[in-house]
Amino acid sequence: MSATMTQAKVQERSGEAVVDMSVVLVCWNNKAYLDPCLKSLYEGGLKCSFDVVVVDNGSTDGSQQMLAEKYPQVKLIQNAGNVGLGKASNQGIEATNGRYVLLLNNDTIVNGPALDVLVEYLDAHPEAGAAAGKLLNPDGSFQSGYAPFSTLLEEFLIVTHIGERLWTGYPSHGDSNEIKETGWMSSACLLVRRAALEQVGLLDESYFIYGDEADLQYRLNKAGWKVVFLPNSAIIHFGGRSMDRWKRRKMVYRGKMMFYKKNYGFFKTLLLRAMFFVMSLLKLLVWCVLFFIPSRNDQAKKELRSNLEVMGLCLNLK
């Protein structure tokens, strides 16, 4: 489907002029990060035309009031509760009409040149379905870039922490100055061509959070769209601000297993679950010992619960 056809569709649907880029942010009790993120968007000197929609998943921290007072130009979609990142992102996509959709985490600080680079690249390369750049830590150090699609060896290196000891940011690559066609990149800041979304579909809402962006880009790759890493685009990403690492672990493992089940078939999914189960069991045994050390007791409780939850997922994921 051509970009022209897609523009005609959104114009017919919305009756509004089509902007270059629609920014979709999902918020859940993250006002302290949402405010500076939006400020960086509006004061970053963007050359391309854009609009912003915030989909709020039932925040109780005053995010809605802050938006009304400081950013009345932002379109707010209010959910009664947390419907998940995938579903909320889709709500935002469907409520906008930009030629490109920027999936953006609210715990980011962006700048105009970094985002204009993404838009200009997709304008110049109609074969590209998505583009993103580097994510940097708040101190400016490299956080992540691009990654190939998961393999069982890669997952072993991640779960054992061997990979991160050998390579900074593993399994992500991208601390370089080369433009790369790749498998997938984080949706913390990912620009996607609407025509590509019209062809392959939106985010799979069954993921809830984690794994949905890799699944989308897997479908883009399969459909012949290029996914491109642009090293001269970089933004700040604080990362993991909506949940603690123990809750996040369960959701990350769930996303990985769902991705394998959907895209890699029964045998690889079985091996992945077995690997996660065994590694979680080993960690469980270690934390059972540490539980009896007073200074480690509180952390041990959280680790024991977290690893038991992962083991349960390995056995019962639908």
Image (tube, rainbow, N blue to C red):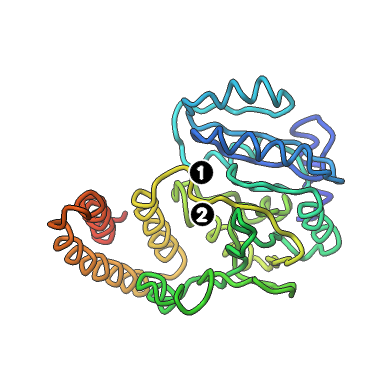
Residue at figure coordinates x 66%, y 52% from the top left: 197
- The quadrant the C terminus occupies is bottom left
- Classify residue 236 as left or right of residue 127: left
Instruction: Give the image location of residue 242, x and y in percent.
Output: 46, 42
Instruction: Give the image location of residue 170, x and y in percent.
Output: 51, 71
Q: Nearer the viewer, residue 280 or 142?
A: 142
Instruction: Give the image location of residue 96, x and y in percent.
Output: 71, 37
In the rendered structure, are the residues bearing label 1 and label 2 in contact, judged by CB atoms less than 8 Å apart?
yes
The quarter of the picture where residue 180 lies is bottom right
| Mark 1: few/some/many CA within 10 Å (<14, 14-19, 20+) | many
Above or below, 199 relative to 163: above
Instruction: Give the image location of residue 24, x and y in percent.
Output: 65, 41
| Residue assigned mark 1 | 85
- Amino acid residing under circle 2: Asp
Residue at figure coordinates x 80%, y 29% from the top left: 15
- Classify residue 212 as left or right of residue 252: right
Residue at figure coordinates x 84%, y 41% from the top left: 49
Q: Nearer the viewer, residue 291 or 259?
A: 291
| Residue assigned mark 2 | 212
- The quadrant the N terminus occupies is bottom right
Q: Nearer the viewer, residue 269 or 60?
A: 60
- Classify residue 15 as left or right of residue 290: right
Q: Nearer the viewer, residue 291 or 221?
A: 291
Kind of element beneath mark 1? helix
